[in-house]
Amino acid sequence: MSGRACSVCSRPDRPELDAAIVAGEAKRGIARRFAVSPDAVERHAKAHLPAALVKAREAEDVANGDALLRQIQDLQKRTLNILAAAEKDDGDARVALVAIHQARENVAFLSKLLAEMRPAPTAASLRAAAEKVAAKAGLSADEVLALAEKMAREAEGKGDA
Ligand SMILES: [Zn+2]
């Protein structure tokens, strides 16, 4: 018996059959509905279903990870748009500084999320943006970045109070 292929695993409608087992449908009823022996359903449920569930779970995790990544990418795009608007000559330097801080956090989170990802290409453009704001404010880019983080921390502190 051990060398025999599972008659349930090889079925084209196996996903529906697995779903019926997971839903708690009676094995006897499943066997009747899918025209297989109750023993085969029982054996398949015990021996093969857990692996299938783990695989489904992994696929779900990957899908969730992709959704999270898309959200961060969307957030970063919007942050950089705010930064671009604030950088204009009539823009608000304070908004630009907060946006730089937020964009840095987005990049850091993205890098953490994708540990194997090469350095985010946005880091360089972020630095360039800081330099532009720095030129306008008569500071160095490092001073602008440090100031942006200080202001963001103060803003967070106010939010807590
Ligand atoms: Zn099976």
Image (spheres, grey):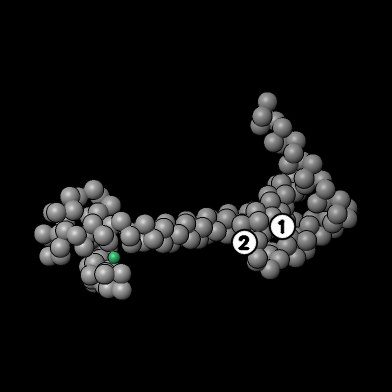
| Residue farthest toward the front in the current orientation of the protein | 1
Q: Residue at (57%, 55%) from the top-left corner?
A: 72
Q: Which of marks 2 and 1 is in front?
A: 2
The reply, left or right, for residue 95 in relation to residue 131 is: left
Say which residue label 1 marks.
88
Q: Nearer the viewer, residue 118 or 121?
A: 118
Q: Number of marks in the image?
A: 2
The label shown at residue 19 is none
Q: Residue at (55%, 59%) from the top-left corner?
A: 69
Percent position of residue 47, x then y: 33, 60
The reply, left or right, for residue 63 in relation to residue 78 is: left
SS at mark 2 in the image = loop
SS at mark 1 in the image = loop
The reply, left or right, for residue 123 in relation to residue 43 is: right
Q: Categorize mark 2 by other alpha carbons within 10 Å: few (<14), some (14-19), many (20+).
A: some
Q: Categorize mark 1 by other alpha carbons within 10 Å: few (<14), some (14-19), many (20+).
A: some
Distance, label 2 to label 1, CA atoms, is 32 Å
Mark 1 is on which residue type? Lys
Visible residue check, residue 85: no
Mark 2 is on which residue type? Leu
- Are the residues at dot 2 and dot 1 in contact (C-beta closer than 8 Å)? no
Say which residue label 2 marks.
114
Quadrant in the picture for the N terminus: bottom left
Residue 101, compared with residue 80, is above or below; it is above
Picture quarter with ligand 1: bottom left
Q: Residue at (39%, 60%) from the top-left corner?
A: 51
